[in-house]
Amino acid sequence: MKRWIPFLKSDPTVAVIRLAGVISASGRGVLNNASLAPVIEKAFVRGKPAAVVLEVNSPGGSPVQSSLIGARIRRLAEEKEVPVIAFVEDVAASGGYWLAAAADEIYADDSSVVGSIGVISASFGAHEFLTRQGIERRVYTAGKSKSMLDPFRPENAEDVARLKGLLEDIHTNFKHHISTRRGGKLPEDQDLFTGEIWLARRAVELGLIDGIGHLKPMMKERFGDKVKFRRYSVRKPFLSRFGARVFDDALHAVEERSAFAQFGL
């Protein structure tokens, strides 16, 4: 009722955007720029929030989607002049840390996992299996690099070198983002971009996060006990709530579980 009464100051509101899951350009239940765009826009615009909180729990994923989501958050934060604060739950690793670094401040639980500032590409080789089965692989291309890293052919040294070059370039972009966002908080005498992970208290010492803390108590301490929280997240498609795509959901759950498992979670 307060907001409808002229000159009566309303209680501050904090918008909370939940960023939980694997970051990928496609798939249901994943984090990507397309699905998060309306969520992020609404969080910054609706009700003039005193701050926007990022509730991060992600093992990472696509570097492009991480960059697009992070850039959108920064653009709106600057346009609306709203501070952004990230709170890490289980993990903010790789692309998950990229998202957290889009915030002005980062906090985590004592046991949260943070870091993994690196880039990885994983594949498989099945050419020996095909040979044993008497299967001949036939591929025709226009352009010598068109079949680069074909898993059904023997590994080619030139292809591997080319891939490593691409990974190094992406890693450079990642390092630039973290160095820019964390500013002078990072130590100059230590390489934090090796893909290593740390628990929260060590991450504080290294300047990767700003402190240990939880969302509600910290926001109440900053904005008062009457602060209100308005939550935003990507909603699942209507039919999936009734088990219409059970197999797809189960497959996604397995993939996500494996992504979190590499951090012991």
Image (cartoon, rainbow, N blue to C red):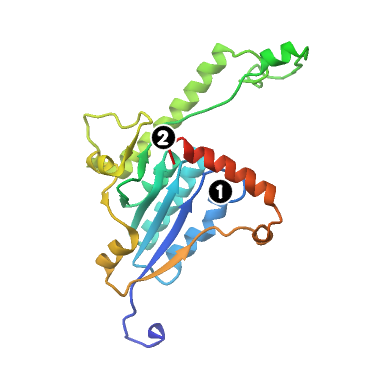
Q: Callout 1 environment at 10 Å: few (<14), some (14 to 19), or many (20+)?
A: many
Q: Position of residue 126 (x, y in %)?
A: 66, 18
**In which quarter of the view is residue 78 placed?**
bottom left
Callout 1: SS: loop
Q: Which of 14 and 124 is in front in this view?
A: 124
Asked whether the viewer can see residue 230, the reply is: yes
Vertical relation: 32 (above or below) 197: below
Q: Where is residue 195 in the image (x, y as percent from the top left)?
A: 38, 31
Asked whether the viewer can see residue 98, the reply is: no
- Residue at x 75%, y 16% (from the top left corner): 137
- The circle on residue 98 is none
Q: Which of 236 and 26 is in front in this view?
A: 236
Name the amino acid, label 2.
Asn
**In which quarter of the view is residue 58 placed?**
top left
Instruction: Work out which residue is located at the far bottom of the displayed protein and give it.
Output: 5
Where does the C terminus fall, quadrant-wise?
Answer: top left
- Residue at x 41%, y 64% (from the top left corner): 15
- Marks 1 and 2, how far apart at CA: 23 Å
Q: Where is residue 129 in the image (x, y as percent from the top left)?
A: 69, 15
Left or right: where 219 falls relative to 126: left
Q: Callout 2 environment at 10 Å: few (<14), some (14 to 19), or many (20+)?
A: some
Left or right: where 132 falls relative to 85: right
Between discs 1 and 2, the one toward the N terminus: 1
Name the amino acid, label 1.
Val
- Residue at x 66%, y 62% (from the top left corner): 238
Vertical relation: 263 (above or below) 153: below
Q: Where is residue 35 in the image (x, y as percent from the top left)?
A: 56, 54
- Image marks 1 and 2: residues in contact by CB distance under 8 Å: no
Q: Which of 42 and 253 is in front in this view?
A: 253
- The circle on residue 173 is 2
- Residue under pointer 1: 30
Instruction: Work out which residue is located at the far front of the displayed protein and give it.
Output: 264
